[in-house]
Image (cartoon, rainbow, N blue to C red):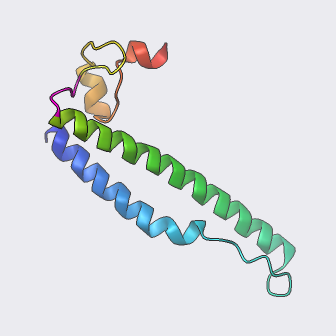
Amino acid sequence: MNYKQRLLEDRDALQELITLAKEDSAAVDLDQSKVGRLSRMDALQKQAMSQEVDRRRQMELTRIISALHRIEEDEFGYCITCGEDIEGKRLKLNPSLPQCAKCATG
């Protein structure tokens, strides 16, 4: 499988997950007459965790879209910081990574 195909599949899967998860991050009903205090706390914690997962998925989706753009511009595989080749093993692990290992850690 080529990188573009993998990125397109990853993008589609992430978009589906984001759509399905919208319900979990919806506003929590704080009406004390309907729900006990511990249940509200559980609901708030679940909401916060869902929002963080959604934030991370959105970040990954942005990286995937950027990688697809770099493919279209014939800039894929080159570090966006130093311009050197990104290691093949690194791209194979995650083709959306925009930097070589040296720039990513430094």
Q: Which residue lies most toward the front here?
A: 73
Q: Which residue lies most toward the bottom here?
A: 33
- Residue 30: horizontal and vertical position, in percent? 79, 76
Q: Is residue 80 left or right of residue 78?
A: right
* Residue at 28%, 36% in the rendered image: 67
Q: Is residue 19 left or right of residue 31?
A: left
Image: 45 above or below 89: below
* Residue at 44%, 69% in the rendered image: 20
Which span of residues is magenta-colored? 73-77
Q: Is residue 50 left or right of residue 34?
A: left
Quadrant location of the N terminus?
Answer: top left
- Residue 15: horizontal and vertical position, in percent? 36, 59
What type of secondary structure mainly makes up the magenta span? loop
- Residue 9: horizontal and vertical position, in percent? 24, 52
Q: Is residue 42 left or right of residue 18?
A: right
Image: 75 above or below 69: above
State the image quarter where residue 93 is shown: top left
* Residue at 14%, 39% in the rendered image: 2
